[in-house]
Every structure is written in C-alpha cells, then in structure tokens.
Image: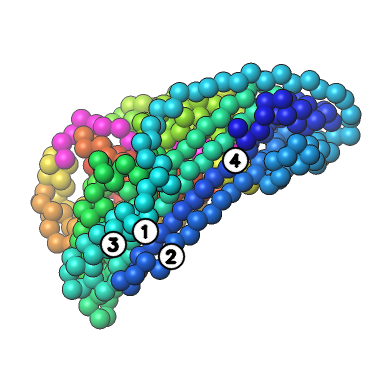
Amino acid sequence: MLIKKAIAEKILGRALSTGGDFAEIFAEDSLKNSIRMIDDKIDTAISGRLYGAGIRIYRGVKSVYATTNDLTEKGLLECAERAAAVIGSLKADIQVNLTEKKYPDVHPVALLPGSVDAKEKAALIKAAYWALKNYSPEIVQAQTSLLERVQNVCIANSEGLFTEDRRVYTRFGNLALASDGVENQSGWEAPGRMRGYEVFRDEIDVEEYAKTAAKTAVTMLHAGNCPAGRMTVAIENAFGGAIFHEACGHLLEATSVAKGSSPFAGKIGQKIANEKVTAIDDGTIPNAWGSINIDDEGSPARRNVLIKDGVLQGYLVDRLNGRIMGMESTGSGRRESYQYAPTSRMTNTYIDKGPDKSEDIIKSIEYGLYARKMGGGSVSPATGEFNFAVAEGYIVRKGEICEAVRGASLIGKGAEIIMNIDMVGQNLAHGAGMCGSISGSVPTNVGQPLIRVSEITVGGR
C-alpha cells in the first residue's frame, strides 16, 4: 500500500483547509524497463523507477496541482499545504472519511516482466532482429526493442474514494530501414498489450511483425511517387484508425470541448458523420493496450459510444472539465504519471464494423489510393485540420489494387472526413500507439475496419 488510509484522510483534510471544495491524491510507484538491439548487438538496457504523488484541489472550476516524491506523512502534508495556500488563506479543520473500494481487474497478467529471465528476453529480441535483417539484402539497418512497465497507483479523494490499481504494459518495436544506396524507406510495427510477458508465448509473434515491417520498407523502396490531387481513398484497418483518433477523437475530448474550441462543441444529438459511422472509445476491452480498470481519477473504465449512425452521442469527460460542462466523468481522466494533472483522454478509440465487404470497397473505386498502412502526422486541435503520411500506399484502378506508391499524404479536416466516409467494412482491428497531450503521453489503441473516403486531398510528388 503506497499510502495508508488514515494518512490519506489527514492529507485530504489539510488540502481542503483553505476553502477548497474537492481534493485528490494520486500516488504512484512505477518500474519501467527497455531493451534495444541495433547494429547486430543489444546496445541499450535501461531500468527506471518513478515514485511520488500529486495532490489536486478544486474550488469551483479553479484547480491547483502540486507534486512531491516524498511519500512520508510529513512530505505529503507539506505538498498539500503548498497547494492549499494557492486556493485561499482560510484555516479550518476538515474531516474526510474514506472507504476502500476494490475494482475488478479485467486485465489478467500471468507473467510479470520481472519474473522472466533476461536471457529469454534477449533471445526474443534477437529473433525479431534477425527476421528483420534477413528479410532482404536491401535492409541496411534493423532495430528491435522491448518495453515493459508496471505501474502501481493509489487514488483517494474527498468524496470518500480510496482505491488502488496495478497496470502492466508490454510492447515490442520493429523498425526496418531499406536502401538502394540513394533512397531510404522505413517500415515500423509495434504491437502492445496491457498484459505481461506471456503475450509473446500465446499471442504476439514478434518475427511475423518484424517481417511485416521489413516488407513495408522494401516495398516502398521500389515504389514510384504518388500523384497528388482530390481522389477516393480506401484506408485499411488497425492503425488506419489513427486518422479518426487524431483528427476527430481529440476534438471530442472535454479538454477542447469545455473551452468551446472544438467544432463539435454543443452538437450532441446532431449528425456530424456519415450514417455508416459509429465511433466508440472503450477502456474495458480485456488486455487491450489502451485499456484501464479505472482512470487516473479513480472512475471505472467505460465503453463510451461517441458517434452512433453518424449522430454525436457524447464526449470524453474528466472531472474538472465535467464541472465546467455540467457533465459527469466518463472514466476518461488520464495522465502519464503523478507529475501531470489528469485531463480527458482516449483509451481504445475506433470506428466500429459497418455493412460493407472489403472486396466491394476496393471494387467501388475507379481511380484512387489504397492506404494499407498509415504513418505519422500533425493535427490542429482547434480546427481538426490534419496532414497524415501514408506509410504504405497503392494506386487503385478500376477496382484493382495496382502499383505501390510512396510520398503520399492525406490532407483535410476531421469534421469533413467523417462526413465523407461512405463505406465501412467488417474487418475491425486495432493498433497500439502512444498519445500525447497536456497530461503527458499515455497508451492508446486506434482502430477501424477498411473504410472508403469518397473524396480527400492526397498530397504527393
């Protein structure tokens, strides 16, 4: 137990002593390990520990947040007093009574990272590395990495909540660089789960992911340049969902909605997307990379339907922005660590299955682009304007996937693209990623089936 209940009651009382109407403690003890292999050798093996607590106080919609890495009673009291002094100068004795609450763990872990021998991990990394390197003589550089994190947290607040949680994350990265001596192209695959090391024994085949990364790099090395212009685009499943996550998902977070800076603010009950689009944020999917038992404010994970049949159903809401908006939390308050105050964030966000078959989506395109794999991009959070690279793309002619093309990018606005999604397939899949915002970087899944965007601007060369 990071903090005893009796001490947490005392800390919260002190935090409220100057006129605050809500106080919260978030304490954390995290262990993180990473191992990387590059240039035929394991060159990095790093372990780190993060230990500390953040204390947050509300007075109306005003919020103060202070942190400390001293979890003794004295250290926590001093932290609470620093935060309380910003709220006001009133001195009052406040009594807080906590009740311990245990939430079910729906993300079972069989093998904690620390229980697995380092030799076995090294063998796993080397197997994936050589699968990358040996895929083709054109692979000039390969990199594999294993990331493990175990985060133990304790959350208490002045509404009486006292709870603990353990989060175990495991992710494997494969990066391939192909070159012909003039041009370079890369391929990247990085599956992750909220599971332990057992994921590599019964679910994730790292060598297969490595070969997929290498195939992308080699294919793009021999691809021609993508033509530019307005065209129909089919975006494949899994990580293709990054476009919805970035261009639309962030605009449905209360972080932007509460300020009125989102184009979707005030539009609940209105049609904002094509009727084939149903979008969901679900933190309850067992062992998914972006899943949680509880959020970082102690609210239980939820399955939040954001858009149903094109109609906006709701937003992702944290406690503070919920106060501003007059809405309850949706289990969406997340943070990277105790060093950040939480805000509304996504978990596993995806476009749900639709009525169309993948082969019919491709056949429907007279001329366009098939984006098999999406890459990185940039988004304006205020407008939803985005620019995303296509990591692996192909021209479609008369309903047939033809030659590979490189240098493609998708350019547009989130509010427009979801109206232009006019075909939604059935091969729903998810892809793991990290999402950055004002509360740091958190694990999130993106996902979708194959979709068709009737018209979008494609940037090329």
Residue 226 lies, with reference to residue 85, above or below; the image says below
- Secondary structure of the residue carrying tag 1 is strand
Q: Is residue 370 left or right of residue 401?
A: right
Where, quadrant-wise, is the N terminus in this rendering? top right
Give neighbour class at mark 3: few <14, some 14-19, many 20+ (Cα, 10 Å).
Answer: many
Residue 104 picture quarter: top left
Tell me where residue 85 sits by quadrant.
top right
Which element type, helix, strand or loop, lies under badge 2?
A: strand
Q: Earlier in the sequence, mark 2 or mark 3?
A: 2
Residue ID for mark 1:
145
Badge number at residue 44:
2
The image position of residue 263, as x and y in percent, is 50, 39
Q: Earlier in the sequence, mark 3 or mark 1?
A: 3
The residue at 73%/29% (across/down) is 7
Check disc 3 and report the residue beneath it.
Answer: 126
SS class, disc 4: strand
